[in-house]
Amino acid sequence: MTDKVVLITGAKGGLGSFITRRFLETGATVVGASRSISQQDFPGPNFTALAVDFTKAVAVNDAVQSVISRFGRLDVLVHLLGGFRGGESVAETDYATWEQMRDLNVTSGFYVLRAAVPHLRKSGKGRIVALGSLTAVEPHPQLGAYITFKAALAMLVRTVALENRDAGLTAMSSCRAP
Ligand SMILES: NC(=O)c1ccc[n+]([C@@H]2O[C@H](COP(=O)([O-])OP(=O)(O)OC[C@H]3O[C@@H](n4cnc5c(N)ncnc54)[C@H](OP(=O)(O)O)[C@@H]3O)[C@@H](O)[C@H]2O)c1
């Protein structure tokens, strides 16, 4: 992985911290993104912190462009960013919760995929992995907003996979147990 540039969204989170450390161990150049991430979170020469709010389209475009300007390429996108809310039936779910789950779990994915795919195509062996959820493939009571948008993310990623086969780019969303 020493010649690869990897962008990880949600790099500072519970899963994100672990996955970011594992990529750093491979020798890849890792750009870790979240709103509050800093260089001190993963000290080391091959880590770059990118502070960005992934619910803002222009900011996401600028962030991806800054990766290309600095490193000249992008080979892997690990899209971990997401948010969880549960405990309410669909009838009890308020509009703000619905919009928050939409923005964190699918709109952020659309923004970063839209910005990153043209660069990942140029890699020749581009890879996209989006963190899904087991709950995205089966309905669950009291999880309507979360699972609806995780399911939408999975469909978005599968569509990207179909659209970019010609460039050797693969895209998958982890939804099922192996
Ligand atoms: N944990 C589980 O058991 C579990 C199970 C199934 C699926 N998942 C999925 O796995 C992924 C990671 O879960 P997790 O539990 O590790 O999440 P987490 O600990 O809540 O971490 C979320 C990460 O996203 C960042 N973030 C939140 N809002 C953001 C925004 N608007 N823009 C940019 N960054 C933002 C946070 O950092 P900042 O605050 O610095 O922005 C943080 O790095 C999610 O997609 C989740 O749905 C988790």
Image (cartoon, rainbow, N blue to C red):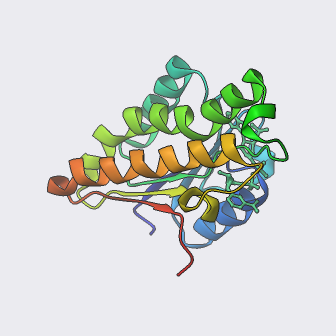
Residue 9 quadrant: top right
Residue at the farthest left position: 166
Whether residue 105 is visible here, answered yes or no, is yes
Q: Nearer the viewer, residue 71 or 57?
A: 57
Locate residue 79, reporting x and y percent. Answer: 55, 50
Vertical arrangement, residue 148 with respect to residue 44, above or below: above
Check the image and report above or below for 5 versus 25.
Answer: above
Residue 41, compared with residue 98, is above or below; it is below
Q: Nearer the viewer, residue 36 or 103?
A: 103
Quadrant of image for the N terminus: bottom left
In the rendered structure, the answer to whether residue 15 lies left or right of residue 117 reads: right
Place residue 82 in its image quadrant.
top right
Direction right: furthest residue: 87
Residue shown at 32% from the left, 57% from the top: 126
* Residue at the image position 72 percent from the left and 66 percent from the top: 18
> Is residue 7 left or right of 114 when viewed as pictured?
right
- Residue 8 in view (yes/no): no
Residue drawn at x 58%, y 21% is 56
Q: Is residue 16 left or right of residue 92?
A: left
Q: In percent of the image, x 28 and y 53: which residue is there?
A: 123
Report x, y in % for residue 178. Answer: 52, 81
Measuring from the top left, give residue 160's x and y in whole percent.
Answer: 32, 47
